[in-house]
Image (cartoon, rainbow, N blue to C red):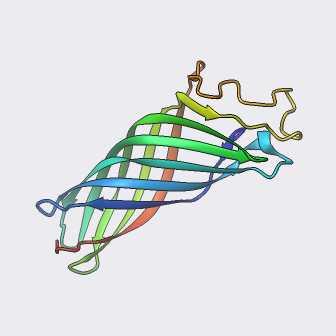
Amino acid sequence: GNFVRTGPALELDVGARLGKRYLPYLFYEHGFLKAGHRFDGADASAASNFYGLGFRYTAGDVDSVGFLSDIAIGVRTIQVTNAGQTYKMSSFEIFRLGLGAEIRLSTLFVLSPLAFLSGGVMTDTEGTVAFGADGSKDGITRPTYRDGKQIGQREGYLVLGIGVGAHFDVFGK
């Protein structure tokens, strides 16, 4: 909450269904985040990007409603921009685990409600950014690790999400 706050995200997946139940895919997710408390009083914006490889498995009846499990790995970046300055943190995200349903509405169209949990540790930095005057109550005016320095005091993060995907099986189920 001090650096970024929650927001909605959109994801684009491209994959190939193998044997009705298996679906390896590539993905790109863009999150529209809010700047955190350190940027109070400033006109700052924040975003996240996550891209990588995933694999889905559908158990049960793949022709109507099945149980969906999803696992993915990738790279996540978080970016904050304020007063013409941009700061990015990035990490290799070691897992994203999702559980949900695959609801086949027609031969070529599937809805997939999904809850997921993902996590990692931010390690790399790029650029710098000044905090808002109202948000710098502790006297810190910039990120401690910046301009390409590795983050020394690393702490893990978790992303919790729920969503619904719409999938088009171009070549049939």
Residues 153 and 89: in front is 89
In the image, residue 9 above or below residue 168: above
Where residue 87 sits: x, y (%)? 65, 39
Where residue 172 sits: x, y (%)? 17, 75
Q: Residue at image x 65%, y 28%?
A: 146
In the rendered image, the quadrant that contains the C terminus is bottom left
Relative horizontal placement of residue 125, taking residue 52 as reference (left or right): right
Q: Residue at image x 61%, y 55%?
A: 7
Where residue 86 sits: x, y (%)? 67, 43
Q: Residue at image x 60%, y 34%?
A: 126
Q: Residue at image x 61%, y 44%?
A: 79
Q: How many numbered marks does the figure carry? A: 0
Q: Quadrant of residue 95?
A: top left
Relative horizontal placement of residue 18, taking residue 38 as reference (left or right): left
Residue at the left extreme? 19
In the image, residue 21 above or below residue 145: below
In the image, residue 138 above or below residue 173: above
Relative horizontal placement of residue 52, taking residue 46 as reference (left or right): left
